[in-house]
Amino acid sequence: MKLFISTGGKGTRLSFLTKDIPKPMVQIAGKPVLHHLVEWAKKYNIEEIIMLNGYKSEVIVDYFKDGTSFNIPIKHSNEPYVLDSGGAIKLAQKYISGPFAYISGDHLCEVNLHNMIAFHNKQKSQMTIFVHNSTHPQDADIIKVNENNQVIKFISKHADHTDAGKLSNAGLCIIEPEIIGLMNKEVFNFENYIYPKALNQNFKIMAYTTDEFIADMGTPERLKKCEEHLKLQ
């Protein structure tokens, strides 16, 4: 399986660290967050990584190059201008050859990807979203599921969260190629556009959850949490 990583973030909430680098290149425990994700991908036998670069893409390309020094093939899809998370995937669709994993590049992740893929295949899901109970649901995308863990509603972090709950999209999913057929725009947010559209067209979307660690480092507080987690390893 290939892994697509959304690496275009500017990191405005970490502007004191991201003046000259994209957000996924902020260091934690001596190496960029994105470097940690590459090591995670190798652990689960990802065959190739596609980095969806945007802001200061040259920093990422120069650091990772073609992946030779990391012992994993890496390709770079560089936005010509801001395409948002969904547009960046569509731009890189030539690299899609089957089911693929997708993760936000500002995340630390310790999820057992083999187990998640097995769940996805068993459920015959067209998209499987890793969810968890968010510690900050007020500014998170919220997922509603039925008794079988099938997703029935997506609530954007920008929408009214009254009685929405805390079950949140954690920034990791497995996607079947037919989802790409829903991408009929050039610039769009993957979650806000594709999730509701897939649900409206009765695509089978499953929620997957474990207590394994996954967290974004997009604010100073969350960055500190990630740093503290790694210190305990």
Image (spheres, rainbow, N blue to C red):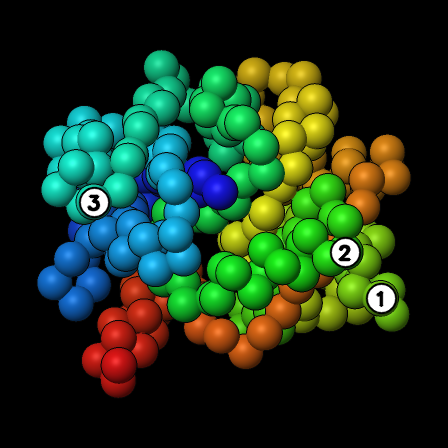
What is the x, y in percent for residue 3?
A: 44, 42
Q: Quadrant of the C terminus?
A: bottom left
Amino acid carrying mark 1 in the image:
Asn
Please tell me which residue is depicted at 42% across the width and 23% down the height of the picture: 82
Would residue 112 appear left or right of 168 to someone viewing this image?
left
Is any atom of residue 139 visible in this view?
no
Pick the residue in front: 156 or 91.
Answer: 91
Amino acid carrying mark 2 in the image:
Gln
Is any atom of residue 158 visible in this view?
yes
Numbered circle sitting on residue 123: 2
Disc 1 to disc 2, C-alpha distance: 10 Å
Mark 2 Cα within 10 Å, few/some/many (few <14, many 20+)?
Answer: some
Numbered circle sitting on residue 148: 1
- For mark 2, give the secondary structure: helix
Amino acid carrying mark 3 in the image:
Asn
Disc 1 to disc 3, C-alpha distance: 39 Å
Residue matched to label 3: 71
Would residue 77 appear left or right of 191 to someone viewing this image?
left
Mark toward the start of the polypeptide (1 vs 3) = 3
- For residue 2, which quarter of the picture? top left
Please tell me which residue is depicted at 41% across the width and 68% down the height of the picture: 110
Please tell me which residue is depicted at 29% across the width and 34% down the height of the picture: 74
- For mark 3, give the secondary structure: loop
